[in-house]
Image: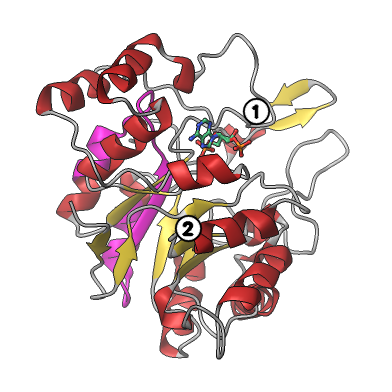
């Protein structure tokens, strides 16, 4: 199986990219260097990860005249944060990301979430009771502003993240530049089969975030299932003489889902790219499909002094109500 997908823009996107969410400052630069040095050509970033400057330091050491890589050889994605949905804020937000990453264009720019937050510099503007301050800006308005980034050459392609099928269709129905990607949580416990099928029917590529089950999400509790320790998965890994992480990544790839596993550990970064030298049988693909529990690990909630405030569900554009 080849290591790229062909996007609707005609560009190629490497199937495996390095995820950088939760990669701490002080660690992410080395992680990106390790990744580029061992063959990754796809780095997944976001303004909200608060580490793009450090990612940029790594890119600057490896990309450019006299460096090992040309800019065109590396596919870089970033994401517009929820506080920047106001159409007049979109270009400046993109420029900030470009400056932080030290790039003149992005290969992909995603709307990080369909919900808009109150404008400003705070990532998570909140009221005194801890609830998030939203804004009424509709994602359709934000999308139009993102389209002009393509026209201006700041980004090669635009796409969505955390959009459900209905919201994606809403964008598709009005878009001048169609969304090229929808990046969503996806792993064997949340296999997203209906959404993947729908995206495919619309020519939208699915990228899996938290493809390994996001064991290091800050709110993980010991009672929640740990995907990488799943005994069924471990049994398959033993049979293929691969790690559970490699089995999962291979499962994504064989479904033509691109994925962005996060790691700051050199051996794991390397291991996560070594997934093109074996093939899971149809039976094992079906077996891994059967692990699905519709278990969503990444639900945006606000932890208010230990008490979860589920106000995100009140937002009209919260994506995970009733639609896949
Ligand atoms: P670390 O960054 O300490 O190496 P996800 O991509 O689903 O969000 O998962 C990220 C988590 O999975 C991190 O805790 C990361 O740890 C861990 N991880 C990444 N690759 C592997 C691997 N090959 N084996 C085990 N754990 C991994």
Q: Nearer the viewer, residue 232 or 97?
A: 232
The quadrant in which residue 293 appears is top left
The quadrant in which residue 151 appears is bottom left
* N-terminal label among 2 and 1: 2
Residue positioned 81% across, 35% down in the render: 130
Q: Position of residue 300 (x, y in %)?
A: 61, 36
Q: Is residue 173 above or below residue 168?
A: below
Q: Position of residue 146 (x, y in %)?
A: 48, 74
Q: Which residues are magenta?
A: 168-197
Q: Which residue is mark 2?
A: 38
Q: Nearer the viewer, residue 160 or 49?
A: 49
Q: Secondary structure at mark 1?
A: helix
**Is residue 151 shown in magenta?**
no
The quadrant in which residue 61 appears is bottom right
Residue positioned 65% across, 62% down in the render: 47
Image quadrant holding the C terminus, namely top left
Q: Secondary structure at mark 2?
A: loop
Q: Is residue 123 above or below residue 193?
A: below
Q: Which residue is mark 1?
A: 310
Q: Is residue 6 above or below residue 123?
A: below
On the question of residue 262 being in view, the answer is: no
Residue positioned 47% across, 58% down in the render: 38
On the question of residue 119 being in view, the answer is: yes
| Circle 1 residues within 10 Å: few <14, some 14–19, many ≥20 | some
Q: Are marks 2 and 1 in contact (CB under 8 Å)?
A: no
Q: Position of residue 259 (x, y in %)?
A: 39, 47
**Is residue 182 shown in magenta?**
yes
Front: mark 2 or 1: 2
Q: Horizontally, is 213 left or right of 304 in the view?
A: left
Ligand 1 visible in quadrant: top right
């Amino acid at each position: 199986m080849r290591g790229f997908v062909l996007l609707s823009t005609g560009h190629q996107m490497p199937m495996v990219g390095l995820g950088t969410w939760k990669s701490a400052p002080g660690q992410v630069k080395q992680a990106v260097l390790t990744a580029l040095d061992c063959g990754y050509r796809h780095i997944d970033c976001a303004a909200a990860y608060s580490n793009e400057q450090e990612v940029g330091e790594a890119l600057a050491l490896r990309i450019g005249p006299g460096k090992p890589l040309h800019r065109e050889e590396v596919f870089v994605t970033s994401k517009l944060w929820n506080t920047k949905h106001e159409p007049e804020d979109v270009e400046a937000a993109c420029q900030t990301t470009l400056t932080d990453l030290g790039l003149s264009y992005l290969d992909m720019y995603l709307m990080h979430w369909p919900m808009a937050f109150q404008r400003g510099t705070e990532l998570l503007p909140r009221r005194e009771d801890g609830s998030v301050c939203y804004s009424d800006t509709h994602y359709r308005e934000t999308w139009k502003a993102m389209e002009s980034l393509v026209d201006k050459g700041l980004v090669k392609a635009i796409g969505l993240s955390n959009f459900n099928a209905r919201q994606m269709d809403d964008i598709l129905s009005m878009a001048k530049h169609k969304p090229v990607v929808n990046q969503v949580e996806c792993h064997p416990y949340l296999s997203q089969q209906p959404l993947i099928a729908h995206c495919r029917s619309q020519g939208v590529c699915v990228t899996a975030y938290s493809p390994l089950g996001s064991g290091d999400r800050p709110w993980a509790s010991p009672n929640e299932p740990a995907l990488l320790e799943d005994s069924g998965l471990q049994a398959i890994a033993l049979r293929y003489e691969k790690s559970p992480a490699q089995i999962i990544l291979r499962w994504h790839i064989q479904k033509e889902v691109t994925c962005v596993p996060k790691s700051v550990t050199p051996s794991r970064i390397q291991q996560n790219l070594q997934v093109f030298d074996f093939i899971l049988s149809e039976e094992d693909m079906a077996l891994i499909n059967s692990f699905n529990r519709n278990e969503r690990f990444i639900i945006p909630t606000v932890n208010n002094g230990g008490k979860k405030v589920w106000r995100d569900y009140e937002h009209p554009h919260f994506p995970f109500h009733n639609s896949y």
